Image: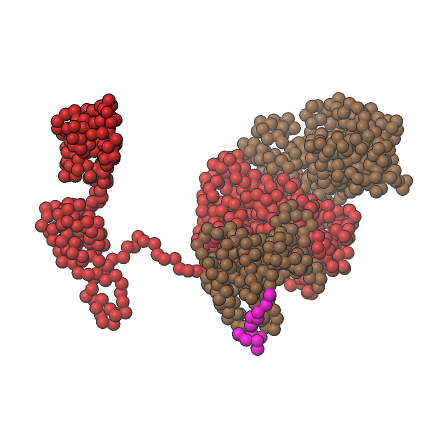
Chain colours: A red, B brown
Amino acid sequence: MADGPVAEVLLRQLATADGGLDSAELAAKLGVEHQAVVGAVKSLQALGEIIEAELRSTKRWELTAEGEEIAREGSHEARVFRSIPPEGLAQSELMRLPSGKVGFSKAMSNKWIRVDKSAADGPRVFRVVDSVEDEVQRRLQLVQGGQAEKLGEKERSELRKRKLLTEVTLKTYWVSKGSAFSTSISKQETELSPEMISSGSWRDRPFKPYNFLAHGVLPDSGHLHPLLKVRTQFRQIFLEMGFTEMPTDNFIESSFWNFDALFQPQQHPARDQHDTFFLRDPAEALQLPMDYVHRVKRTHSQGGYGSQGYKYNWKLEEARKNLLRTHTTSASARALYRLAQKKPFTPAKYFSIDRVFRNETLDATHLAEFHQIEGVVADHGLTLGHLMGVLREFFTKLGITQLRFKPAYNPYTEPSMEVFSYHQGQGGTWSWEGEGCLRLPTLSPGPFHCQAHSQAHCQTQHHPHDLPCPSPSSTGLRKWVEVGNSGIFRPEMLLPMGLPENVSVIAWGLSLERPTMIKYGINNIRELVGHKVNLQMVYDSPLCRLDAEPGPPRTQGTA
Amino acid sequence: MPDISYAWCKAVLKENAVYILLPFKLNKLKLAISFFFQLTKNLMNCVLNLVWNLMKLYDLLCLEGLVRGLQVFKERIKAPVYKRVTPNGEIQKLIITEETARIRPYAVAAVLRNIKFTKDRYDSFIELQEKLHQNICRKRALVAIGTHDLDTLSGPFTYTAKRPSDIKFKPLNKTKEYTACELMNIYKTDNHLKHYLHIIENKPLFPVIYDSNGVVLSMPPIINGNHSKITVNTRNVFIECTGTDFTKAKIVLDVIVTMFSEYCENPFMVEAAEVVFPNGKSYIFPELAYRKEIVRADLINKKVGIRETPENIAKLLTRMHLKSEVIGDGNQIEIEIPPTRADVIHACDIVEDAAIAYGYNNIQMALPKTYTIANQFPLNKLTELLRYDMAAAGFTEALTFALCSQEDIADKLGLDISATKAVHISNPKTAEFQVARTTLLPGLLKTIAANRKMPLPLKLFEISDIVVKDSSRDVGARNYRHLCAVYYNKNPGFEIIHGLLDRIMQLLNVPPGEKKGGYVIKASEGAAFFPGRCAEILARGQSIGKLGVLHPDVITKFELTMPCSSLEINIEPFL
């Protein structure tokens, strides 16, 4: 409260002061602790423009406890000198005096006393001079009297070395009148109360101003996980576009639905132990739709439906092998198979977002599990142009408007195209030339380099969660990044399901983690997914508004 | 504009110090080419078009194929016609004996006659074999290639299988003879060859090829003999490919001979070899089969979404190494698929090549007219609704792994793994991926353990799938959608977790009490829970999960120090 007696006195003093006053001087004048004056200054400051206070720090010399003792009673050497009677004093006796040890050596070096070692009963100390000037005491008394400046630098430092003086920094306020200076202050209310409202007293009361620079108190609340916030937005986008959600609640899948149904041959590297998690228990699928299985087998081993087939010995045991699904395209295959059984054919748009699993080497951007986003449209006469059109609408909803397409290889789509988008925020322009290929403005590890991983596996499965590789020379890194993979499902996949011949199915996929990492500026996937997540990051993560904000600049190397 | 020649391409690549053509470095090749070609932008377009297809076109694995592809694309040259010719003299014969049947039953062969190698050509020839071995040959498991100086050998050749101790020869680049057993030991420490040993290791018989004098040509898929080693000076090359996949062996042989017959005295002419199978049937290789497909131009237009004349489409395809012409009613295109394009197995592959040559980014985008009404998957819809209200109830969402160790779901929770009905992974690289989780609790406890520095209390939840064996499902396992929540503080906070259950039931419109499909909790036991602090949750007439205070042993095993209560239910009954 500002209305302590000190504050009132301060204001009265200030009213008559010329220009202002010093808080320490005031304290000395009033005979109160300096802290009390400082408290009064602060509380007056809080009231607004009544006073102005400028913080000043001054250095001052003060006596230590020992220094004060000396100022009072004289230096140790002087005390030793005085305690020696004219007939001298036994040294052993002298050493027992309180100042004995220190005072003796100092008095000796001052040549005030001498020791006679030949005395009968041990060494004896005698005065050498009749009287002494206690210079140390005098100097300390000067300091005590606030006249430290009268001492030379050398003298002060000598006293400091003897731990008789210390230098203290004193923070004082220079107080002057404020624009709303007044000697009469009334008590300010801190908060509005129900009583004030009912009595109307708030009309007459001054209120203490708020400090709007202070932080508020965050509400106690729960938080949604950033990756799943992004998942919600992707679901929303698909729903807005009229896509129906496919069931994907089966992490365990048979090789048949995961690979064979997609016309992925049984020797394909993706079906290798190195890439896929197979199951020991239950090791094999119990049931497969055998009619359909036979059509798939025939297509792989002999061809059909206009295809040469892969011409190899297709094995049912291989198709029965259970695994953790490597993509949600297996769920799409099941959905399309169900669609094919409905006669007559009705066009469909499907989507899914769920976990998939890869038995691969883990690093900053690869985990054994991640979320795949997949969209599928089945209708008569769909073209590559339609696929690109749907992709354009889809990515526009994500806030990505610059799209380019390049040929790619997928085992189950033909034609296949990778989707690239320009990631804003970095320099460099992109130009396009007649024959439809991309031309890179300078040496660009960008779009190519970022596929290093999938290339490493050399025609293994597509890895939609590949991030652009961190590059040591990131200044030259173009921000054209692969944002998805897409294509038209091969007839060898669709026709054995029983879909009509003139029905095309376009599809695309991407990972959920990658756009989320870009959006939230996360470089290590473990900071986002899994138990090692930093909960503070979850608490602090903003809303997911994919089309509203550009992601934070992704400078490589910033955590 | 520089001429697209072998020397030029090679100079470009060398200049950029990325002349690394191993398959796993293919992206570097792309990089180098993309870098150089920006200087000559028209070329850039065609190079990228071709290089983009690198992954599936085996003939682009070597510079010869790439250069030829570029030249054809730029219409500098016409695609060469590869021909198999029967020699004037005796045809080279490879006889397969029946012993090979159980280990590596197929073999194909061909001869490159009067070839002229240079250092570059020779290196490229070796590199191509290596790249094929890594790629289509599946690290030699499906196919292994052997190339030999024919002038050092005398046919007919025999492809047979023998006991390893009975095979003895001087292998490539060694100075003395070893038995096959000895070689398998020696190569265990060979960084290159050790990766192939497993293909035949522990088999009673090893495949081996002899000439008529008993000289060992090769012991596929491990090593060739030193006797028939080819050099820069070799003029006549005998090529054999053995394998377990006949189709792939034929493709591999075709790729090699089409690429390197260019350097024969009669370019693109390949001398035939005869292979006699154990059943007495005899085949002539290489196949070098040209196949004709007829595709309607309007089909290509319709699939791609363009409107080009049949003539233009034929031109586009021809540039992609698919010689095409308009025939019949003027709408049909006859396409010749050369032996180098083994990837073309359906009209859709031809459609893609037309689209690539046309340029994907030149295709007019359109929206399909497909009219559909969207539906959410009910389980996900319920999950989404619950997630928001769990957060509104003050709990923070975690996202944990579906795979974990056996220890996480069993030992640490005081259970035996056999009691969990968990599905087991057969080939985990680490213990973190032994099983699919059967409960969400371990993931949440691990999340807390990783966040012990955060201010208390920690209130976490997760709504996600767990997996258990279920023989009523086609794959023998199924997911359940679980909701799990934990409260971690200086006090166990059972009442808080209990209150959360009450709130969840309120949200799901399930009344308290056993009647009318309501819910109750009943004292129960659970290995993970502190005795007397565990209850089973019964709702809609069935048990849906448990809640309680965690057992101190569980808390300790998850490296936690504070009391903790938890709740885990299956939400599927509330659909």
Q: Quadrant of the N terminus of chain A?
A: bottom left
Q: Nearer the viewer, residue A300 or B438?
A: B438
Q: Is residue A32 left or right of residue A362?
A: left
Q: Quadrant of residue A192?
A: bottom left
Residue at position x 70%, y 37% from top? B134
Q: Is residue A248 visible?
A: no
* Residue that sits furthest to the front in the current view: A120
x then y, percent, for residue B213? 88, 27
Q: Is residue A62 left or right of residue A241?
A: left
x then y, percent, for residue B317? 67, 42
Residue B565, compared with residue A529, is above or below; it is below
x then y, percent, for residue A509? 59, 51
Q: Quadrant of residue A539?
A: bottom left
Asked if the magenta segment contains residue B538, the reply would be no
Q: Is residue A192 visible?
A: yes
Q: Nearer the viewer, residue A313 or B552?
A: B552
| Total labels drawn | 0
Residue at position x 28%, y 69% from top? A194
x then y, percent, for residue B356? 62, 43
Residue at position x 54%, y 40% from top? A469
Which stretch is magenta?
A: B511-525
* Residue that sits furthest to the bottom in the current view: B515
Residue at position x 72%, y 48% from top? A265
